[in-house]
Image (cartoon, rainbow, N blue to C red):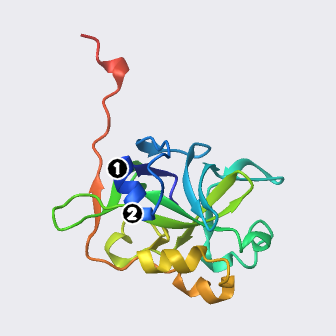
Amino acid sequence: MCSRFELNAPLDEIAHRFGLPLSLNIAKKLELRPKDKTLVITSQGPRFLSWGLTVDWNSKPIINARCETLAKKKSFSPHLAFRCLIPATAYFEWRKKGHKKLKNRISILNQYNESLLFAFAGLFVDEYFTIITCPPTKSISHIHNRMPVILDAKREALWINTKNTFESVSKILIPYQTKRLKAEEQKPRPDPQLNLF
């Protein structure tokens, strides 16, 4: 499941891509973690919300929600009208190899091999949001058995339009199909304790 993502683009690019005012104070984030605040776009406009819904039955925030069970689970079913977009430039997933976990940065590249801005589908409740997940597209299924739902621009507008029922937009919660989805294994960072000189 997605537990880290990145929003690493200039403010003017983010504003242009999502139709936002340049006056917004959007800081670049190379690695967003659960409980961090970030830009979220709702039908009412941009907000800065914390990643992970709070629930009575778990001390940890609920950072992901499976698309297949959104309408069935009590944690999500009352909030299906509160849909949002979460801008990103990449997300991180860990691939298991024996006892090791190998970190992968997954992004969508343009023709110049630069990371494109995109948006996850999400739900929000009060000051919190969660990212919706689905089965992975074939090109990254070797890394993990889930991926965040990534929406193209046309589906973004459908998703956050509150005139659309959840039932009518639930069919767009599918794996992102593109040949430009790129997974790059990240080199482990050196342990600072080992740098003795």
Circle on res. 17: 2
Any part of residue 102 in sight? no
Coordinates of residue 123 in the picture (x, y in percent): 65, 65
Coordinates of residue 94 in the picture (x, y in percent): 42, 54
**Rendered image quadrant of residue 98:** bottom left
Q: Amino acid at mark 1?
A: Ala
Crowding around mark 1 (Cα neighbors within 10 Å: few <14, some 14 to 19, many 20+) is some
Q: How many marks do you count on the picture? A: 2
Q: Nearer the viewer, residue 138 or 98?
A: 138
Of marks 2 and 1, which one's residue comes earlier in the chain? 1
What residue do we see at 38% from left, 48% from top? Answer: 11
Residue 176 falls left or right of residue 111: right
Q: Which residue is mark 1?
A: 9
Label 1 residue SS = loop
What residue do we see at 57% from left, 77% from top? Answer: 159
Coordinates of residue 3 in the picture (x, y in percent): 52, 52
Q: Is residue 128 above or below residue 177?
A: above
Coordinates of residue 174 in the picture (x, y in percent): 49, 81
CA gap between label 2 and label 1 equals 11 Å
Residue 16 falls left or right of residue 39: left
Crowding around mark 2 (Cα neighbors within 10 Å: few <14, some 14 to 19, many 20+) is few
Q: Nearer the viewer, residue 94 or 88?
A: 88
Label 2 residue SS = helix
Residue 158 falls left or right of residue 128: left
Any part of residue 6 in sight? yes
What residue do we see at 48% from left, 79% from top? Answer: 155
Instruction: Kindly check if marks 2 and 1 are in contact, taking CB atoms under 8 A apart as contact.
Output: yes
**Rendered image quadrant of residue 63:** bottom right
Q: Name the quarter where the C terminus is drawn.
A: top left
**Rendered image quadrant of residue 19:** bottom left
